Amino acid sequence: MVFLFIIVILIFVIIFSKIRIEIINLKFISNAQKHLNKDYSIIFKICILKYIPVIKLEITDKKVKKLNLKKKMENINIQKLEKNININKIKEILKKHKFIIKKLKLKIEIGTENSAFTAMIVVLISTIISFFLKNKIENHKKQKFNVKPLFINKNLINIDFSGIFEMKLIHIINIIYILNRKEGVKNYERTSNRRSYAYSYE
């Protein structure tokens, strides 16, 4: 009885828990020697019962340098990684991902050597962002994004990004399940070595 009670409590906690990601002052400048600014911060939180933080992880420029991620990335076997990528699983995850945008501040500046192409790509990116955000935004008053063309006869992109994103913990568990699930023969599906008339009457 006690064990059953604990299981019920754990299920209740998981259902009403969430992952919260806070991105603060992240800037990218393509034509600078150091593309990312130094004072950005990315905070990951796991909150139980929606509001009580139990785990917090903060990523900053200093911490990234200590981890020496650039050197670790160089040691990754790209060919082996490509073989392990399952396109069907990625599509399934993209269909099922359910996150909410609590707050968003996004500014993009784009310039190319062709003014007509600059204008076209700005419209295209604005349309894609609007389409992507329309079902994810919780409060439209807290969302600001602007895609601006720069007609300077030069290829560059500047991004200024801050935001707060939330996702239910149960959806994260579902994604982990999809990634670790082995592809097998589906129910009611014949295997290649079974004759189609095996169960038919003569």
Image (cartoon, helix red, strand yellow):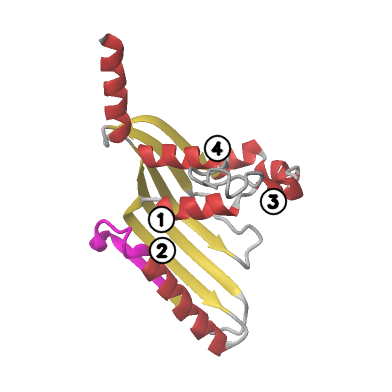
Where is mark 3, residue-wise? Answer: 82
Please state which amino acid type lies under the numbered disc 2. Leu
For label 2, count other residues whose C-alpha is less than 10 Å away and answer few (under 14), some (14-19) or many (20+). some
Q: Is residue 141 magenta?
A: yes
Q: Disc 4 or disc 1, which is closer to the eye?
A: 4
Query: What residue is drawn where x is 47% and y is 50%?
Result: 93
- Can you give x and y, in whole percent of width and height, for residue 148 in the image? 45, 76
- The residue at which mark 2 appears reads as 106
Circle 1 is placed at which residue position?
Answer: 162
What is the C-alpha distance between the residues marked 3 and 4? 16 Å
**Is 115 in front, or is 80?**
80
Q: Disc 2 on helix, strand or loop? A: strand
Q: Could you classify mark 3 by the number of other residues whose Cα lies within 10 Å: few (under 14), some (14-19), or many (20 or more)?
A: few
SS assignment at label 1: strand
The residue located at (43%, 40%) in the rendering is 174
User: What is the secondary structure assignment of the residue under circle 4?
Assistant: helix
Q: At x 56% / y 85%, what residue is drawn?
A: 117
In which quadrant will I find the N terminus?
top left
Instruction: Nearest to the eye among marks 4 and 2: give it.
Output: 4
Q: From which residue to which does the magenta span run?
A: 133-146
Q: Is residue 67 left or right of residue 91?
A: right
Residue situated in front as seen by the camera: 143 or 167:
167
Q: Amino acid at mark 1?
A: Ser
Q: Which one is nearer the viewer's eye here, 200 or 56?
A: 200
Tell me the CA gap for discs 3 and 1: 31 Å
Q: Which residue is at a point 40% across and 46% down the rendered structure image?
A: 22
> Looking at numbered disc 3 in the image, what kind of residue is underneath it?
Glu
Disc 2 and disc 1 in contact, CB within 8 angstroms: yes
**Mark 3 or mark 1, which has the lower sequence index?**
3
Horizontally, is 202 left or right of 46 in the view?
Answer: right
Residue underneath mark 4: 180
